[in-house]
Image: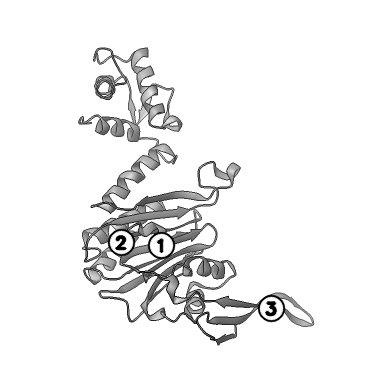
């Protein structure tokens, strides 16, 4: 694919012609072509450094793409992560150019590899040496770029279906720990992303400290309302300013999972008759149950439990078979300050 680049003034441009095979017949191949000019934003649009460690990854089997990120920077989730179902995910950080997120996603959507998309997006960027970008396509192809002027420690690790990158880190061990955690964790993409972020945080993370964290996972029809609403936003959570943002992000995800996601382990259930006493005491402490703690499952206890679940938006986890999901039971007990 031939590329022609040129620059003019603060709005440098890259023009390239793309050729796609359209048919292969007796008369030989017929190609379709188009020209596209990309206008790089002025350097002034990049306001500050995103001092960050992040991971971009894809699960082609489920169709998931996502980003998890943490930083000593306010509301890092408003700057770094970009993702689109069926296309890919991007983390743009260091001296972050937020325009790179949608631009690289556009290029991925138009069949460019992550590497080529990054090369084209940075070709006319006057501050490319200060940028750090991680990209993954929905097919699992990954690529990362760490500019030579990114503040140390800065680097990246690219693996099968993921890329980990960071700058102003405690050391190389941060991204290495993240890569290992991602590769060794079972479960959905969201579980593996969170595990990687937690591993990076434990390994030292941003050497200046902690402030914010975020996770975004896109899945076709995976959002609230599903295909009926045409929503792909499977998980989208942010901690904008917190002394322990990665831990807080985990807490938020556990609530999100209980409220929205439907992925319970069928074997993780409790017989309500066997835990009635604990349920009654928990509901009593939380103000939903006014009866005696008898340890017997009755209608008053069931009504109180249903009221508590409705109050917490757990309606989709209600059961009518005399059992309770383990995730719901443990959340109830923890919320009441009891031991399961």
Against 22, is 198 above or below? above
Snapshot quadrant of residue 212: bottom left
Circle number at residue 79: 1
From this view, report whether residue 248 is shown above or below residue 200. above
In this orientation, does residue 138 appear? no
Q: CA distance from mark 2 to mark 3?
A: 43 Å
Q: At which x and y percent is residue 216?
A: 42, 54
Tell me what residue is drawn at x 41 percent, y 79 percent: 128
The image quarter in which residue 199 lies = bottom left
Q: Quadrant of residue 67?
A: bottom left
| Circles 2, 3 touching at the beta carbon (< 8 Å) | no
Q: Secondary structure at mark 2?
A: loop
Residue under label 3: 33
Q: Identify the mark at residue 73; answer none if there is no mark.
A: 2
- Give the spatial CA distance, label 1 vs label 3: 34 Å
Foreground label between 2 and 3:
2
Mark 1 Cα within 10 Å, few/some/many (few <14, many 20+)? Answer: some
| Left-right relation of 115 to 22 | left
């Amino acid at each position: 694919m031939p590329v022609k680049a040129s620059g003019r003034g603060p709005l440098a441009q890259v023009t390239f012609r793309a050729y796609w095979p359209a048919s292969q017949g007796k008369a030989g191949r017929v190609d379709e072509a188009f020209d596209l000019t990309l206008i790089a934003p002025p350097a002034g649009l990049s306001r500050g450094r995103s001092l960050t460690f992040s991971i971009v990854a894809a699960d082609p089997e489920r169709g998931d793409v996502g980003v998890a990120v943490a930083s000593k920077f306010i509301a890092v989730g408003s700057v770094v992560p970009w993702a689109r179902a069926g296309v890919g995910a991007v983390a743009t950080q260091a001296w972050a150019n937020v325009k790179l997120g949608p631009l690289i996603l556009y290029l991925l959507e138009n069949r460019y590899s992550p590497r080529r998309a990054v090369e084209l997006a940075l070709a006319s960027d006057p501050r490319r040496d200060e940028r750090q970008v991680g990209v993954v396509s929905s097919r699992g192809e990954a690529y990362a770029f760490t500019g030579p002027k990114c503040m140390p420690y800065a680097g990246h690790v690219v693996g099968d279906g993921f890329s980990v990158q960071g700058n102003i880190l405690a050391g190389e061990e941060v991204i290495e720990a993240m890569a290992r955690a991602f590769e060794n964790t079972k479960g959905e993409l969201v579980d593996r992303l969170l595990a990687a972020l937690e591993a990076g945080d434990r390994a030292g993370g941003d050497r200046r400290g902690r402030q914010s964290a975020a996770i975004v996972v896109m899945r076709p029809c995976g959002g609230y309302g599903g295909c009926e609403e045409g929503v792909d936003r499977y998980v989208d959570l942010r901690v904008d300013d917190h002394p322990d943002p990665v831990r807080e992000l985990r807490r938020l995800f556990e609530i999100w999972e209980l409220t929205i996601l439907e992925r319970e382990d069928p074997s993780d259930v409790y017989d309500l008759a066997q835990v009635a006493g604990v349920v009654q005491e928990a509901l009593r402490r939380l103000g939903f149950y006014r009866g005696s703690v008898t340890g017997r499952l009755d209608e008053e206890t069931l009504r109180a439990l249903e009221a508590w679940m409705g109050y917490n938006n757990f309606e989709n986890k209600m059961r009518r078979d005399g059992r309770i999901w383990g995730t719901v039971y443990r959340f109830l007990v923890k919320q009441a300050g009891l031991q399961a």
